[in-house]
Image (spheres, grey):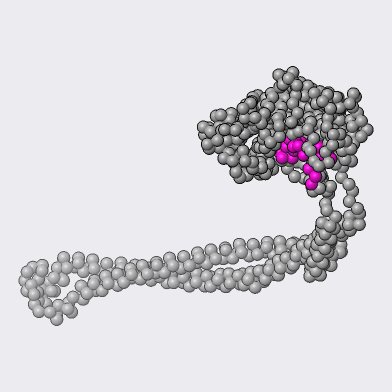
Amino acid sequence: MNNRIHIKELRVTGPGVSDASLVFERGLNVIDGASNTGKSYAIQCLDYMLGADRLPKQIDEAVGYTDIYLEIKLNENQPLTFKRDLRTSSDFTMAKVSIDEFPTRKDKITLKKKHEANNTDTFSGRLLQIIDLTGKKIKTNQRNSTRSLSFRDIARLISVDEVEVIDEKSPIYTGQVVSKTAEESVFSLLLTGTDASDLEEIEDKKIRRGRLNGQIALIEKFVAEYNDKLTALNVTDTKEEALRIEARIAELSSILSEISKEQEELTKKRKELWEKIENYKSRILMNSELQDRFHLLQTHYQSDLKRLEFVTTGEEMLNQLHTVECPVCGNALDKDHFDCNIQSEEGQEVRAAMEAEIEKIQIKMADLLGTIKNLDAEKQQLQQEQRVTELELKELSEIIARDLEPRKARTKQEVENLLQEQKNMVEVQSIEKRISDLAVEKSKLSEELQTKQIAVDDVTEINYTTHQEFSDYVAQNLKDWDFSPNPSVQFDPTTMDLIIDGKARVSNGKGFRGIAHTAFIIGLMNYCYGKSLPHPGTVIIDSPLTAYQKADYTEEDELSSDMESAFFEALSKTPPDRQIIVFDNKSPSDIVVRKINYIHFTKNSSQGRYGFIPID
């Protein structure tokens, strides 16, 4: 079920003045009375509270009023109250309460007065959300440009003032040429439920020509740059050359593999030689340490020999010494005593022991000297082998550095050069492909430039069946209002207006144009209800029965009393799920008054209600 909006109350307030209020009901509401009682001002206030930017005209009776409120109710009777400043065109303040509760509520929110696409924090966005028209788009020109639907686009099809109702232009038009397409699109949206979101925009001819020429110029620039690259690459891109490069790369790869293998073997051998040299160095160092130890032992042996030889040659030394006491017998140690000592058994044993020790040390000395000599020979041999190995290592290193590495580097460089040639050939092929593709694209653009644009199907166009179904709703209204016994109504898509009984609506007098315009607006609401299509659910019509009296007004512009009576009688049967608000100078019958919400302005301060704004 589509959401609808029904107006509950319009209220104008200000400090020190009595509230001016109109309370409405579902179904038919009639506000009538004499001229200059505030009916037009009330309609302007309603329009202002339906999103108009223009303030209501200042009238003397409205001096002191500062704020204006509008309470609406949704299908489920939930109240929403909106407030605006009456002195300057302002944003809206909204709360989900009645007018009476509004001043004390803390949960008010501000809604911008200016519509913004898909923004429900605007008055337009909030009402479109309520009636399920959020995000809809309308067509704005013959090139299928679109814009977001605003509630103001719909407001003029639900609220009609006393001038518009008898105007000769179609009810869907404002008279602004630049808005004509958009206004047709809004009418189409309401009749079909289909918006212009899927329209494919037709490009402006000048813009299209400039775009295509620009794209062609850009392609030519790219092609020139690509040709410069081809020249700079200077590559012979042939199949034979590609095969030659591929074969040479394979050959060089094999050579690199052999060089690497040889280099690996020589490196392994060089490592073995280096380890061998380190082994020589270690053995030579050990040999040197042994020689040092043996030389130290030789020194000890020599010291022992000298000590023993000193003792055995003591006789010579004793002859040169002063007489001393013998450590053996205690007597004076003279020559006779020395001979005694020598000839004694103990002396003979000592002497024999020393000689044996000397002989033993001399044997060890001889073995030690032989060992030292052998070590020295071994060291010289190791040093010689080390020098030979070092020469061999140096030769291997020179082979690697002087031969293998340069060969490897040269081969790698040649491979890299060939790979670059291959890369250049691939790039040449890619560039040539791009040039070819650009040539095709340029050809297409040139062809498109010479071809006229093909019209795009307009999905927003209304078919004959839809037009006729809508016309039937209008015809039913006119029949109920005694416009004619059995009115024939067709919709003329060229004028976007009605043809009634074979005669264009605009060809009738003001009174008939007004009643037909009213039938159009109410018929549109009833059609949307019948098709379950979005519609606010309320229409406001000013003076549908009283033709606006311009200088050329004649009696022919008046409607018959029978038609006026039938008009009110038929509308009094308006279902409670929709709302019609009529402002007029003509009054319904007493029978009708009892069926509807009726407000009468007397313009008499002592009788009934004077007008919209109270007279203090």
Q: Position of residue 520 (x, y in %)?
A: 82, 32
Q: Which residues are magenta?
A: 151-176
User: Is 96 left, or right, of 585 in this rendering?
Assistant: left
- Frontmost residue, 320 versus 170: 170
Occupied quadrant, residue 254: bottom right
The secondary structure that dominates the magenta segment is loop
Magenta stretch contains residue 432: no
Q: Position of residue 268 (x, y in %)?
A: 61, 62
Occupied quadrant, residue 5: top right
- Frontmost residue, 293 versus 430: 430
Q: Residue at x 56, y 65 (%)?
A: 273
Q: Is residue 369 visible?
A: yes
Magenta stretch contains residue 163: yes
User: Is 402 left, or right, of 546 in this rendering?
Assistant: left
581 relative to 381, above or below = above
Q: Position of residue 424 (x, y in %)?
A: 78, 64
